[in-house]
């Protein structure tokens, strides 16, 4: 199976119709149908469920479609970077968690977009494990992660602003009347927390002896969705300061104060494009800090 086969298959999946996809690809419908059949034979699985006017992806087809998008995107990104070695253009592929502390990074990105109109940026939201996975397979140029972590496998740049941990609560919740929230305040409350934070030791250490008295009722990926549950008054959410605004909720910081640092990271083994090098250079100048590793 080659890259063209993946492109053909993904076009069929996007179109939902082989005849329509054939027109878009400028190939004949029988040739495209035969190409998909050959892929199914080669892989030994059914990729499409063929209906009268529409095709649907099987589970195997959905997996191939998702991976194919990554492979095609990586190929296009690589070709663009190779062909534009002497110019500042191309795409910055950045993965990041949610943090108000990323505003200075966005300021630098905006400067690059203004100075170099041929550049663009793709920002993908995700937790640390997803970001590192995509960095390692080349789908991302940079990742922005939160918290203290072993970064020995990556080059990194510390982002000065910290994330402040606290609790998002319904405005009518008794906790909303407090200035700060201690672990004892959360005993017998239903707590939801990000999936990444759930597996970290920092919040567990903060809770101390009260940890076993805390009830974690759920986890979330994006605080904007979790906020809707908090608005019902049934749960409170442990999250960073400044991520959401709502007339029905309030944020109260933890006590003792709990912070996370932010780091820009990139793969030790991947050569940065010109726009990537410029991005790091501008950030280094803005943050006036030392960078680890070389580029």
Image (cartoon, grey):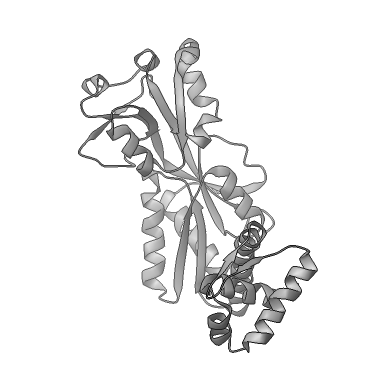
Quadrant in which residue 243 is drawn: top left
Residue 251 horizontal side relative to residue 85, left or right: left
Q: Is residue 2 above or below residue 220?
A: below
Q: Is residue 85 above or below residue 221?
A: below
Farthest residue, direction top: 209
Farthest residue, direction front: 52
In the picture, the quarter occupied by the N terminus is bottom right
In the picture, the quarter occupied by the C terminus is bottom right
Task: Give 237 or 229, whichever is nearer the viewer.
Answer: 229
Residue 267 shows in this picture: no
Task: Give 228 or 97, whichever is nearer the viewer.
Answer: 228
Q: Residue at position x 57%, y 66% from top?
A: 56
Q: Is residue 256 above or below residue 144?
A: above
Q: Residue at position x 49%, y 15% from top?
A: 211
Measuring from the top left, give residue 192's x and y in whole percent: 42, 30
Measuring from the top left, give residue 88's x and y in whole percent: 50, 74
Q: Residue at position x 45%, y 26% from top?
A: 217
Quadrant in which residue 228 is drawn: top left
- Number of marks in picture: 0
Q: Residue at position x 35%, y 43% from top?
A: 224
Measuring from the top left, give residue 218's x and y in whole percent: 46, 30
Residue 127 shows in this picture: yes
Measuring from the top left, give residue 119's x and y in whole percent: 45, 72
């Amino acid at each position: 199976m080659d890259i063209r086969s993946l492109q053909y298959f993904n076009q069929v999946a996007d179109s939902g119709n082989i005849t329509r996809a054939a027109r878009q690809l400028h190939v004949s419908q029988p040739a495209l149908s035969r190409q998909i059949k050959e892929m199914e034979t080669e892989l030994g699985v059914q990729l499409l469920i063929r209906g009268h006017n529409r095709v649907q992806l099987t589970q195997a087809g959905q997996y191939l479609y998702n991976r194919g998008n990554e492979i095609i995107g990586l190929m296009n990104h690589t070709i663009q970077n190779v062909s534009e070695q002497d110019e500042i253009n191309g795409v910055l592929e950045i993965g990041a968690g949610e943090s108000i502390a990323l505003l200075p990074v966005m300021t630098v990105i905006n400067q690059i977009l203004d100075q170099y109109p041929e550049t663009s940026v793709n920002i993908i939201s995700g937790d640390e494990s997803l970001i590192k996975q995509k960095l390692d397979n080349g789908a991302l140029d940079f990742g922005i992660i939160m918290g203290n972590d072993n970064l020995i496998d990556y080059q990194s740049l510390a982002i000065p602003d910290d994330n402040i941990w606290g609790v998002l609560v319904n405005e009518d919740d008794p906790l909303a009347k407090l200035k700060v929230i201690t672990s004892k305040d959360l005993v017998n409350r239903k707590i939801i927390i990000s999936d990444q934070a759930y597996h970290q030791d920092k919040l567990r250490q903060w809770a101390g002896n009260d940890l076993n008295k805390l009830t974690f009722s759920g986890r979330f990926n994006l605080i904007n969705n979790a906020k809707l549950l908090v608005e019902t008054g049934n749960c409170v959410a442990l999250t960073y300061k400044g991520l959401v605004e709502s007339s029905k909720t309030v944020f109260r910081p933890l006590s003792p104060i709990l912070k996370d640092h932010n780091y820009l990271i990139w793969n030790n083994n991947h050569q940065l494009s010109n726009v990537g090098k410029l991005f790091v250079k501008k950030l280094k100048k803005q943050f006036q800090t030392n960078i680890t590793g070389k580029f």
